[in-house]
């Protein structure tokens, strides 16, 4: 079987690299997505949320608020711990 060179963004490469085991090639990783019944096959999720009534804009705002709150708590905890070290 031959090979073909492709160009992908660094983000895509890093994603594939995170899935790749030492004994697998990048082709193996990509073909796993094609395999039916494979838990890594994301196509089984296609259309899963089509009948779900969710305000995605509100969900995004809510998650942004959560992340900001979490980041604030982490910063406050780090500052508290740093003061305790002095």
Image (cartoon, rainbow, N blue to C red):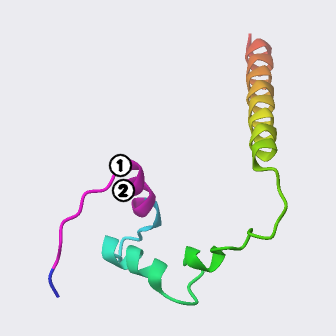
Please provide percent x and percent y for residue 77: 79, 25
Q: Is 23 situated above or below 56?
A: below
Q: Residues within 10 Å of mark 2 (few under 14, many from 20)?
A: few
Contact between labelled residues 1 and 2, with CB atoms less than 8 Å apart: yes
- Which residue is at 83% across, 56% downward? 54
Give the residues in magenta. Answer: 3-17
Residue 13, numbered circle: 2
Quadrant placement of the N terminus:
bottom left
Residue 56 vs 84, above or below: the answer is: below
Q: Position of residue 69 (x, y in %)?
A: 81, 30
At horizontal 45% and vertical 58% (from top left) the residue drawn is: 15
What is the residue that sits farthest to the left in this orientation? Answer: 2
User: Would you say residue 80 sits in the magenta stretch?
Assistant: no
Instruction: Depth check: give the residue in front, 19 or 22.
Output: 19
Q: Say which quarter of the image contains residue 42.
A: bottom right
Task: State the residue at coordinates (74%, 69%).
Answer: 50
What separation in Å lies between label 2 and label 1 (alpha carbons)? 5 Å
Residue ID at (81%, 42%): 58
Q: Secondary structure at mark 2?
A: helix
Screen quadrant of the C terminus: top right
For disc 1, the marked residue is 10
- Taking the magenta stretch, the answer to whether it contains residue 8 is yes
- Looking at the image, which residue sits at the far top? 86
SS label for mark 1: helix
**Residue 25 in view:** no
Q: Position of residue 32 (x, y in %)?
A: 45, 80
């Amino acid at each position: 079987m031959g090979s073909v060179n492709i160009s992908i963004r660094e983000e895509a490469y890093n994603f594939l690299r995170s899935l790749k085991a030492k004994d697998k090639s990048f082709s193996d990783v990509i073909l796993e997505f094609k395999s039916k019944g494979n838990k890594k096959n994301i196509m089984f999720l296609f259309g899963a949320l089509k009948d779900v009534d969710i305000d995605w804009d509100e969900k995004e705002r809510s998650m942004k608020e959560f992340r900001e709150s979490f980041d604030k708590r982490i910063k406050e905890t780090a500052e508290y711990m740093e003061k305790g070290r002095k």
